[in-house]
Structures are given as structure tokens and as C-alpha cells.
Amino acid sequence: MASTLTAQNESVGSVPVNSVIRAFELMCCAKAMTELFEKNASITSKYVHATSRGHEAIQIALGMHLKPQDYLSPYYRDDSILLAIGLTPYDLMLQLLAKADDPFSAGRTYYSHPSLRRDDMPKIPHQSSATGMQAIPTTGIAMGIQYQEKRGLLPSYPDGKPIVVCSLGDGAITEGEISEAFQMAVLKKLPILYLVQDNDWDISATGKETRAMDAVEYAKGFKGLETRSIDGTDFMRSYQVMRDVIQTIREERRPFLVHAKVPLLNHHTSGVRKEWYRGDMEEAIKRDPYPRLKTQLIMAGFTSDKIKHIEEKETAAVNEAFEKALKAADPKPEDLFKHDFAPTPITEEKGVREPEGREKKVMVDCALFAMQELMEKHPECLFYGQDVGGRLGGVFREAATLAQKFGDDRVFNTPIQEAFIVGSTVGMSATGCKPIVEIQFADYIWPGINQLFTEVSRSCYLSNGKWPVSCVIRIPIGAYGSGGPYHSSSIESVLANIHGIKIAYPSTGADLKGLLKAAYYDPNPVVILEHKGLYWSKIKGTEDAKTVEPDADYIIPLGKGRIVQSAEPPQTPIGASLSIITYGMGVYWAKNATKNFPGKIEIIDLRTIYPLDEELILASVKKHNRCLVVTEEPVNNTFAQSIAARIQQKCFEYLDAPVTVIGAENLPAIPLNTILEQTMLPNADKVSAAIEKLLTY
């Protein structure tokens, strides 16, 4: 289109004339789409959507300066950015209508929630609806790029080094996770641009109601985050600022924040309409970027006829795309079940579990050696979290010596930011890094659950398989040594309800090493729960957690349990044997309890919470006809009870007694006092009593 137009000069102000023409074409396109969606609201509002109307100038100015090597995290009002990087109205409408060929999610998520992995456009990892949630994963992308640059792992780009852009609404700036992202951006001097589009509305609440300062004022508290504040309705000024800031980031590799004031001219979303509460529309319309750019074109020498030609052509193209999108196929029912996980290459146990001539090692050492072997072999592997750096090597010394061997850029401390530790793995993974991170205690995972649930677990599924998050999250767990209410919790039931992650829970050093290796090579997010009471085998009765360290090639597929102890064939048909299903510390309570019942008890160590070795569980129960499930969690509403329910459903005709679950007492927290702790937790004596009751049922 631009080639059919001429202008008196080669530029309009300092902006190339072809760029101004292209910007106007895109603005016409975005405006026409908004008007078409509103005109056809009975169709287009079936699924909630928002549009960029009023935000177009700053969005287009940004999009025009991005390159294929860049990464972009738009938010749900950023369809003009998507048009500016090269996506078509048809692409966006396929998502608007949740069609099978929606290029982002195959009909799984909302309009302008892109997931893009094309060679000729900036890369866009999965974007969620949760306002501000994208800041941490996107800052993780910048961290991954920086790491690869330092290590010489990044390709050379003749037209400039890659940058990362995170687009935000000003209402999101009050989110705590934004602070975590800004903190890391300035701490690490990351090559990232935060674009804040400020329309002064947070759904129905205004800026005066919800914030004490605007984004620039807030950002000044983060030393090293340089800011610009502009009128985002002025395309010419927006273009110049985006050009200068992005070029500076490409060259100087440091973070910026651009705060653009814009009006919201359309609804918050199609489901929250402006006429319900907006009393400022007349004033907002006066700041419309569309007539402003139109006037600038006329002043630059373009005729009204040429401008009208652009408007009509873009409107016609939008209408044509809509008619085509309406006819596109919907997803098929069977499409629902695709891409919950990326396929893993680890499908069988390999390597030597007990090499000859080696001494037994404690669990924590087996983990350390596994990490060391992975980092020696894979330069993209990093490890970070609280206190894991060279000075301490983790509060359990599980990372001792790693920083000294591999450097502070590969093994490093983070601030006390569980949300960032978890959520940054999304961005790190997107760049090709393989992050292994640690949450210091299971009790501290809760600030990170937001990112784990919303971003990490759903990325593969909602991006239709394009962006699985390949990461390992290590979490010391469980009660040990009067750790008290904030260092003793069991959290597996909460995690088991987050679909889209895998969860391992080893009970021996050999299993921890083999599962760590499997987790690393799995392209999906894997949480490894490591019982701190087993780390050093200091608790009487847990000596078998200490094992010969497997060789470097040893690996255990996730989802394969282990027969810890077999029962002898029943001598009588009833009450002769029993199956215990357990994991973690439960393995040792069970082993010590069964000393009172020689030959009668089979113990199954699950080793992974998800995927679950259901085949092994059911085979054991069908063989022994009685089952006890042992967990460390308070019993009510737990993962252990879900196992019992599954056994009850699938083995009903084999059972000679009710499936029983034993665990901790149903109380809010584990007390500090040793007597109270022991009273609350299971132990071998309690398990033994439960066995006796079941065998004599």
C-alpha cells in the first residue's frame, strides 16, 4: 500500500514517510476491527475480548521497531502491537472466534492472548489474562538472554542484539510481582523494556482510587531503571522514543520503562461495557490518536483522497477477513486432549543404580553430584534460589561447591522472591536455558503458586504445544527436628491439583539422583520434593535413604514406582498379607512398622506423585486384597485419600477390607514443641497399629 502513495518529503518530522503511512494503515486496520467487532457483537462477544482503541499509536510505534530476534509479552489490549509485528486481522479473528486454526492456542484462550514462535517475527511465549503476571516470566527471558550472551551461547545478529519487551497496563503496577520483576531487572541490568500504557482505568476504578503514584514515579524507586514519560496518542513522538530507547537497550543492555498516557476509547472488555460506568468519554475522545495522525498526514502533504483510499482498503480487508474467519472450522472434541505435556524422551530406567566399589552416600550428596554432572554436560543449565550461591551452597548444603565450580553467573542467589524464582523459569526456558531453581522450604512456596499455576503449568497447553516450560523446581519438604510451623509443611496435595506439572518425591539417594536427571531431560516443568529429614539419614530408621551413588548415566522415568519390600505368597486366603502405598518419609515408617509382620507386607514407594504409577498400585492391591496408604500430610482432603478412592473404585471386587489412610493429625500447622510434633505426625507405631487393624478386619 505504501508504494502507491507519495509525499512531498522523505520523512514526516524525523519519522520516515513510509513508516508514517504504514502506521496509518495499521491504525485504520485496528479501528476497523474494533468497529466490526462492535457492529457484530452478538457474534464477536460470545467470547470476551478487548481491543486497543485509543492505545494504537504507542502500540504501533513499538511493534514497528521489533525484530525477529526479540521477545515480546503483550497484554490483552495489545492487538495493534500484534498487527504491527506482522500478524493479520485473520490471524487475530481466528482467536477471537476460538477456531481450530487460531495460530496462538487452537481455540483455547482469549483474543489477544498470543503465543507465537515464527522465525520472521518476535517470539511471544504464552500470555495469560492475569494482569501483571507477564512481568516476571518476561524478565526471566531477559535474564536468559543475558546469561547466554555472557556464555557465548547466543547467535550473532547483524541488525542488533535481541531485546525483551513487557507491555503492561498502569493498573498492574500496584501488583507485588511487578516489584519483583523491576528489582531483578535493575539488579542484573537486564536488556528489557517495560511499556506501561496508562489509560487511567482499572476496569471501573480510576487511577486516583487505586494508586498513590504513576508508573514513572514508582519506577524511580528502582535505581537503574531509566524512564520516559510520553503522550502515547502522538505517533510521531512515540515512534521517536521507541526508536531511541530500543536502540539504547540493544547497545547498552540495561532496562528502561516508558510510561505512555493514552485514552481508553472502547470497552474495558466486551463483557464490561463503557456505557455502564464511564462519564469521561467525551473528554477521552478528544485524545483519539486516529484523527491526530490523520491530521499530521494532511499537514505533511497527503491528500484527503489518498487517506480515504487507505481507510476504505483497510476496512474492506478487515471485513473480508471476518467473513473468512466465520467459516473456519471449530476445534474437534479430541483436540481437547492434545499438548497437556510435551513428550519426554525418558521412558525407561537406564544406567547403573549400584556401581561396584562405591560407598553409600547420603541423599543430599547424591543430589549434589547429579547437579554437578548436569552442569558439566550442559552449558545451558543454571541453578538459582535463596542462599544457594557460593557463600553457603543452600541451607542444607545441597549446592555446596557448585558456585565455585561453575561460576556465580550459573549458580547464584536471588532476593527473597519466590514468585520470581518460580515464574522466571518460564522466560529462561523460552530462551533455551534449562533453569533448576530452589524454594528454600515447602512452607515458602505460596507466593510462587500464582506463577506456578497461572504461567508455568498452563504454558504448554494454552500455547498449543509451542511453549512448554522446561524447568526443575527443587523444594525441601516435611517435618524434621522440631522445625516448627514454618519449616515442616507437606504440600503435595496442593501441587497435585495443579495440572500441567510433574511432581517427584524420592525417598533414597539413588532415586533422587535418577529422578533429578529425568526431570532435567523432561521438556516439562517438574517439581522435586526432597524430604529434609532424609537428606542426611540422621533420623533413626532412615538409614536406607543412604545408598550407593548411581553412575552418571543413571536415570529413572517419572511415573515409575518401586517395590521397596515384597510380601511372601499368602499361606491362607484371608488376612495373610497387605499392601502399603506410600512415599517420602512414609517409606521408613512403613519399613519399621512391618518388622512386626514378617513376610506379610508389600511396600510400594510411589517415587512420583504425578505421573502416578497406577499400574503398580493396582497390581499390588489385587495381589494382597488389603491396602494401607501412608502419608505425612494431615489426612483430610489429600492426595493420599485420592489414591484410596482410586483403589476403592478400581479394585472393589478384590478388597477384603476398607482402604485405609493414615497421616498426620488434621490440624493447621506442625507445632514447634517436640512432644507436640511427635503427637501430630505418623510414626512406625501408628502405622503398625493400622496394619494390625487391617489384617484382622
Image: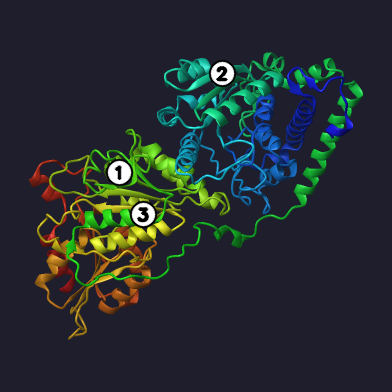
What's the residue type where badge 2 is placed? Arg
Q: Residue 62, percent across and down?
A: 64, 29
Nearer to us: label 3 or label 2: 3
Circle 1 sits in a helix, a strand or a loop, which is it?
helix
Q: Of callouts 3 and 2, which one flags the residue occurring earlier in the amino acid sequence?
A: 2
User: Taking 39 as reference, is 470 above or below it?
Assistant: below
User: Taking 488 as reference, is 640 above or below it?
Assistant: below
Label 3 to label 2, Cα distance in Å? 43 Å
- Of the 4 image quadrants, the one containing the N terminus is top right
* Front residue of this view, candidates 150 and 86: 150
Q: Which residue is mark 2?
A: 228
* Front residue of this view, candidates 126 and 72: 72
Q: Which residue is mark 3?
A: 376
Q: Is residue 697 among the parts visible in the rendering? A: no
What's the residue type where badge 3 is placed? Glu
398 on left or right of 336? left
Label 3 to label 1, Cα distance in Å? 12 Å
* Front residue of this view, candidates 625 and 531: 531
What's the residue type where badge 1 is placed? Ala
- Of the 4 image quadrants, the one containing the C terminus is bottom left
Tag 2: Cα neighbours inside 10 Å, few (<14), some, or many (≥20)?
some
Check residue 403 in the rendering and tell me which mark sits there, or answer none. 1
Circle 2 sits in a helix, a strand or a loop, which is it?
strand
Q: Residue 196, percent across and down?
A: 56, 25
Tag 1: Cα neighbours inside 10 Å, few (<14), some, or many (≥20)?
many
Q: Of callouts 2 and 1, which one flags the residue occurring earlier in the amino acid sequence?
A: 2
Residue with the most extreme right position: 305
User: Taking 503 as reference, is 421 above or below it?
Assistant: above
558 on left or right of 481? right
Q: Of callouts 3 and 1, which one flags the residue occurring earlier in the amino acid sequence?
A: 3
Q: Residue, x 15% and y 57% (percent of image)? A: 537
Q: Residue 552, percent across and down?
A: 32, 64
